[in-house]
Image (spheres, grey):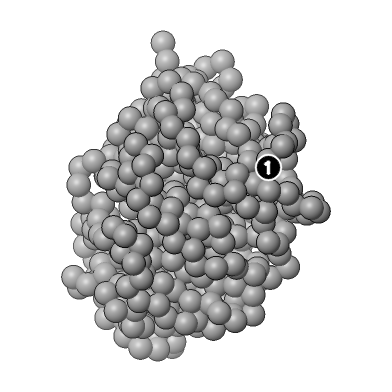
Amino acid sequence: MALIRPLVALVVPAAAVWLTAHPSAQSADSLRYWPQWRGPYASGVSTTANPPLEWSETKNIKWKVEVPGRGSATPVVWNDRLFVLTAVPVGVSGEAQHAARGGLRPRGVHRFLVLAIDRKTGRTLWERVATEAEPHEASHTDNGTWASSSPITDGDSVFAYFESFGLYAYDMNGTPKWKKDLGDKRMRNQFGEGSTPALHGNTIVIVWDHLNGDGSFIVALDKRDGRELWRVEREEIDTWATPLIIEVNGRPQVIVPAMKRNRSYDLATGSVVWESDGLTMNPIPSPVYADGMVYLMSGFQGNDLMAIRVADARGNIDNTPNVVWTLNRDTPYVPSPVLVDGTLYFLKTNSGVLSAFDAKTGKPHYQNQRLDGVPNVFASPAAAQGRIYIPGREGTTIVIGSGPSYEVLAKNTLDDGFDASPAMVDTELFLRGQKFLYCISQTP
């Protein structure tokens, strides 16, 4: 059950919180589009999109295209195009190119691709080979890909991150601008890589946690030329969670979950603003933020959720009122939570079992609600127009109503499975499957 402490939070209007969560996303365009992992507010929420409620292979499919190779990177969207990352095994074609290859030996050379796709037609506008290389270690036998990190765009550049295989910057027409090699990660049990950078203003932040904490660090780069701004060593083992950048009292902080210590870093200097007791091993879900509170969670070999008030958090906040409430059960392993209108939704491990909690108090609205027809979930939920979209890896996306009561609005099944998270822009929903990329929109 939740450990609930009195809430003495700074409460601000939800819209203001969204704008300060990622100040680089304050323009109307970046609020409208899906420029990064988890959307304009890094929360899985769009305040402008209105995608369809229902679809099938024969209903509300604007277009469907095959994506070469394999990847679970979420597409990002800006203006008239999508950007997608994938890793294509050289010399492999047909269905085999989409199959999991993490446990194969030899792993073979892969072509790491950046694709720009026309939103209207699904046609590939340009394709760039960032690099060709043979992976230096395995990935997860069943679930891993070598293109699990999502791209980022600010409308001027596209940043394609393949972790051990490099970070690449292009202009919107695919002209290379710069690249950065941070070395080779060594992941525990060779589970594979999959963290996405965060972008704020002119700064890209990358968390590089790997095996035994030897050589782990967090680094800030200038998005204009890849120049390193600062680097701080970390004694943390594998972390997959994407960092969250929020603005606190007018100063940006980088929130980074981890097993030993959760930390907030000053974006300008890399100095630690506050830290707390860590989460379980293998932190994967990305934090979310609203109303002065940040929510961190993980669910491998245990369960941890921490709700932290950040306005006055400084130094070691263990056993202080800044840790407003905690939970030690039913938290997610891979999927990130979604926070909508004061309710925090999250899945249990990687299963189709959902809980909804009052975000301020930690009191449950409902717990362990089984999602019919969606037994396994690796994608993170996304929300718009009072609806929450939860894609399952067997091909069914369940749509539920947001609010304190559980209500199923629709169940929609396609001929593919989904590990990548949804993207939503205007009246369109984009789902990247193991083989196909779908544009779902109301059709006559």
Q: Is residue 441 above or below residue 212?
A: above
Which residue sits at x=44%, y=61%? 180
Q: Is residue 322 above or below residue 31?
A: below
Which residue sits at x=56%, y=61%? 164
List the single residue furthest toward the top: 444
Give residue 57's position: percent from left, percent from top: 58, 20
Which residue sits at x=45%, y=44%? 382
Give residue 388's position: percent from left, percent from top: 45, 42
Which residue is nearer to you in this view: 126 or 405? 126
Can see residue 145? yes
- Image-quadrant location for residue 280: bottom right
Q: Is residue 329 above or below residue 428?
A: below
**In which quadrant is the N terminus drawn?**
bottom right
Answer with left or right where residue 221 lies relative to residue 354.
left
- Image-quadrant location for residue 223: bottom left
Which residue sits at x=74%, y=52%? 107
| Mark count | 1
Answer with left or right where residue 166 lies relative to residue 403.
right
Answer with left or right where residue 320 lies relative to residue 246.
right
Q: SS of the residue at dot 1? A: strand
Which residue is nearer to you in this view: 52 or 21? 21
Pointer 1 local density, CA inside 10 Å: few below 14, some 14–19, many at least 20: many
Give residue 243's position: percent from left, percent from top: 43, 65
Amino acid type, label 1: Pro
Answer with left or right where residue 376 lies relative to residue 34.
right
Provide the residue designation for mark 1.
89
Which residue is nearer to you in this view: 160 or 259? 160
Q: Is residue 78 above or below residue 15?
A: above
Give residue 95's position: percent from left, percent from top: 73, 31
